Amino acid sequence: MVNPYMSRFIQHQTGSCRHSVKGYLPSSDQKLNSPPPQKRQPTTQAKMCRHCSHIPYQSPHAPEACPYLRSVYCQFCAGYGHESSSCALAPPELFTQAHFAEQLIPTHLLKQYNIGTITPIKTITAPKKQVILELPDDDKMIREYLFNQGYTAVSNRSKEIRRNLDEHCQKNNLKWEKIQVF
């Protein structure tokens, strides 16, 4: 005995089915040589917010209606709807960094061991690298460079040009090296 569901499947596969399946077999009113149906034009979608643009199957929404942002908790103002990095009530950096070693120790340990000292944390800043300024030893070229850097009253005297260049290099952490021009 033949399974009725299987026989219908075989009819669709062989094309002997009487009714048309949209897109697979031409209906009786369609001609065989007719052009294929036109594709639908893609609709312009609303822009996604920057948080959800990479999430697949997310419906377009404005940043104000973002489901991700509605679930984010801000630790500075104790509210929902924005990240801590963009909070208007965020404390200044002075209060968020430890300046004393005792600020890094839990308060119960400070009390338990009777620690009452204040030991400052020394911050080490790396020195800025000195940038090398390569200019030819030509008064005309140096004068042109200084003019482009904002020095408007540069005279034609060689000593004054060199003094202005030294002042500019000192102010901007530059080291002037003379190059040969051929």
Image: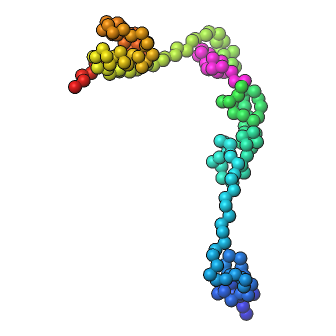
Q: Can residue 166 be seen by looking at this rendering?
A: no
Residue 180 percent coordinates (x, y):
24, 22
Measuring 60% from the left and 14% from the top, which residue is drawn there? 100
Question: Magenta segment, which residues?
Answer: 89-106
Image position, residue 181 (x, y; %):
24, 23
Q: Where is residue 10 drawn, in percent x and y? A: 67, 86
* Quarter of the rendering occupied by the N terminus: bottom right
Residue 178 or residue 66, whichever sits in front = 178
Let me know if residue 99 is in the magenta part: yes
Q: Is residue 38 above or below residue 156?
A: below
Q: Position of residue 76 (x, y in %)?
A: 72, 26
* Picture residue at 68% right of the left edge, 64% below the top: 40
Badge count: 0
State the residue in front, 52 or 45: 45
Residue at (67% x, 61% y) in the render: 41
Residue 65 sits above or below residue 153 on the image: below
149 sits to left or right of 13: left
At 66% from the left edge and 78% from the top edge, which residue is drawn?
Answer: 24
